[in-house]
């Protein structure tokens, strides 16, 4: 549906430019935007590769294991349906850790594996309580170091590209607490209304 809306907006803009006599400006904007997109993508790749390398070093140094052990008690309480030694918790913890460092591309495969494992645990095609909680957590923009945003700010020559880290942490805390509260509220409402999940 979103693709159809964007396609309609683009077509309306082009048709308007044809009747308004501004097709030359539209063409110039298209080529300039394409060039900027390529430049921005190359800059983003270098930053993402850097942070993926940092993550790899952190993993080999055992820092990720420490982070995992810190977050494990919280994750066990958030996902009571999942057995404590189940591999799903490992995928969830890896996803959360990657998201905290702003590495959405690295977090996605772990998130997909976690969802697959949770689906196997539930044994149905219906979204389980754990799947909904996991989706709420991922939607809450769980990030401490927003590497992609920092990279974009660096590309546009920001005087201090990392100054957003403080506000990002504050926004993450608020959005994550909000997501968990809403998730638990709807779970309690659903439980009292239907007598269970």
Image (spheres, rainbow, N blue to C red):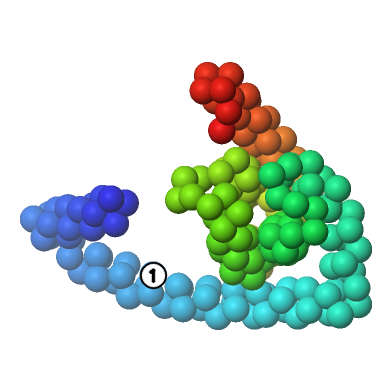
Please name the residue shown 51% across and 45% down the image.
127
Q: From the viewer's perspective, is residue 136 above or below residue 190?
A: below
How many other residues sit within 10 Å of disc 1, few (<14), some (14-19) or many (≥20)? Answer: few
Query: Which residue appears farthest toward the top when viewing the image?
Result: 193
Closer to us: 54 or 38: 54
Please name the residue shown 86% across and 80% down the image.
60
Please name the residue shown 42% across and 77% down the image.
35
How far across and how far down the image is residue 142, in percent? 69, 50
Q: From the viewer's perspective, is residue 92 above or below residue 57?
A: above
Number of numbered labels in the structure image: 1
How far across and how far down the image is residue 131, in percent? 58, 48
Where residue 146 sits, quadrant-wise, is: bottom right
How far across and how far down the image is residue 176, in percent? 69, 40
Query: Which residue appears farthest toward the front when viewing the image?
Result: 123
Query: Which residue appears farthest toward the left when viewing the image?
Result: 19
Visible in this render: residue 136?
A: no
Please name the residue shown 80% across and 59% down the image.
85
How far across and how far down the image is residue 42, in percent? 55, 80
Residue 137 vs residue 42: left or right?
right
Q: Which residue is mark 1?
A: 33
């Amino acid at each position: 549906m979103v693709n159809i809306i964007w396609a309609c907006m683009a077509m309306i803009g082009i048709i308007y430019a044809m009747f308004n006599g501004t097709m030359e400006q539209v063409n110039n904007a298209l080529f300039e935007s394409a060039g900027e997109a390529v430049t921005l993508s190359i800059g983003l790749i270098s930053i993402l590769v850097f942070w993926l390398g940092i993550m790899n070093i952190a993993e080999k140094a055992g820092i990720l294991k420490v982070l995992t052990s810190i977050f494990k008690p919280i994750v066990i309480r958030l996902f009571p349906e999942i057995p404590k030694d189940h591999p799903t918790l490992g995928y969830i913890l890896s996803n959360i850790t990657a998201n905290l460092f702003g590495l959405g591309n690295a977090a996605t495969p772990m998130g997909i594996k976690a969802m697959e494992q949770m689906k196997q645990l539930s044994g149905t095609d219906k979204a389980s309580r754990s799947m909904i909680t996991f989706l709420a957590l991922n939607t809450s923009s769980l990030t401490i170091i927003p590497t992609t945003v920092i990279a974009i700010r660096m590309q546009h020559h920001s005087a201090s590209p990392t100054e957003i880290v403080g506000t990002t942490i504050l926004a993450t805390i608020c959005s994550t607490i909000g997501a968990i509260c809403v998730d638990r509220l709807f779970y309690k409402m659903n439980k009292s209304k239907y007598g269970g999940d």
